[in-house]
Image (tube, rainbow, N blue to C red):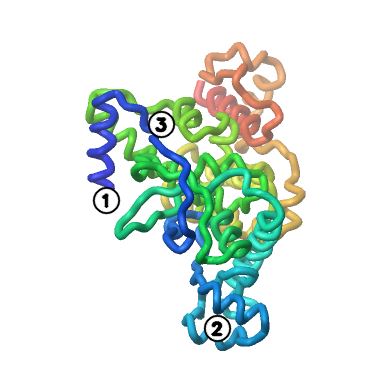
Amino acid sequence: MNELQHEHLLISFLNNQESLLEDSFSFQSIFLSSVIPDATNARFMPAIFIEDNDAKLLVNRKITKRQLVHKYQGEDHVLVGQSCMINCFKHGSAEWKRVNQTIESIMELGNNISISELIQAPTLYPVNDGKYQILTGHRRFFALVYANGYGSAAQFKLYKTKPLLSKVKQFQENASREDLPQYGKLMAFKNAMVEVVTLNTARLKLGLKKLTVKETAITLGISMGAFDNYNVLTRYNCVISAYESGLSAPFIKVKKVVLAVEAEYKAQYEKSVLNITDKENISDKIQAKLMDKKTVEATPNTYRVKPIKSSTTIKTLLTTNLMTLDTGIEWDKIDWDDHASVSNALSSVIEFIEST
């Protein structure tokens, strides 16, 4: 479905005042061999599924991994079958390392499924030729194949049709899981925001207002604070690339790095609005800091303000109740624990004093 078709469908639903997030579904038992992973999902892993008989031969050492890789042309994929998962990426490469971590978590989940039930069923929707595509639950699906074999069946939550806000649904699940990699969460957020932009375009064409920031956060199923975190972390692609390459620092620490670099750059060049070149320069500085893990893990909590040009400004700062000045700053909404927010407010005060 292209963006224009998606927009027309959204307009139709909005015009009929139908809920975009309440899609009809049922629970059904479906053969795993009928299920297709979604290559656009941040949780996607390039996999080739092994027939149960071949997986059994490998487990019983009647066929080698090399023979299996050759038979399934598995280069740059992961071969997945009952009781076996084979990483066929180049050994030691970044992709090999990233996939290896995913394989370990899938095998652990698969072993748990072997002795207990899967609590939350993966979600699917029908596609062509009697096949079903995964909407959410890629890792659980791979674990089911690992535990029970590609020819087995399992219980799935099946939507009648593909949800119009499918990427929003994927993000909602990713954001709610503490155990999932940060890279997948950031990519899921970016994909979800593409749908939100399309939704806002459809709303405007119907004469409706765009979703507010609060409404957007509610639609995504996260708090306003979490929404701000995701916005800051997806502002520069270097942050997403860092997480893809193995960065594991908490979001809040990396957010502080991004905001600190931005604030320092704005103060150094006396800028309030950033152009493309500015953002590229900031991205380079952020990347350099993220490559230094010590910097990320121990970002200094310092306040940075723009350079002060005159002693008069300093005198005003020392002798005036700054909150009574008509600066336009909403002091009661400032997060005083956020050094970047406080620094920006102080810089705005200095600009106001120097302009009067």
State the residue in front, 306 or 169: 169
> Mark 3: which secondary structure?
loop
Measure how far apart labels 3 and 1 are at the Cα level. Answer: 22 Å
Measure how far apart labels 1 and 2 are at the Cα level. Answer: 38 Å
Q: Which image quadrant is residue 139 in?
A: bottom right
State the residue in front, 82 or 264: 82
Residue at the spot of label 1: 2
Residue 141 visible, this angle:
yes
> Mark 1: which secondary structure?
loop
Q: Residue at x 39, y 40 (%)?
A: 165
Q: Residue at x 60, y 11 (%)?
A: 324
Q: Is residue 94 above or below residue 196?
A: below
Q: Residue at x 33, y 35 (%)?
A: 199
Task: Tell us which disc is closer to us: 3 or 1.
Answer: 3
Residue at the spot of label 3: 22
| Pointer 2 with pointer 3, Cβ within 8 A | no
State the residue in front, 78 or 91: 78
Q: Label 2 sits on what residue type?
A: Leu
State the residue in front, 232 or 205: 205
Crowding at label 2, few (<14), some or many (≥20) Cα neighbours within 10 Å? some
Labels 3 and 1: the sequence-earlier one: 1
Q: Label 1 sits on what residue type?
A: Asn
Residue at the spot of label 2: 68
Q: Label 3 sits on what residue type?
A: Glu
Name, please, the residue furthest toward the top. Answer: 324
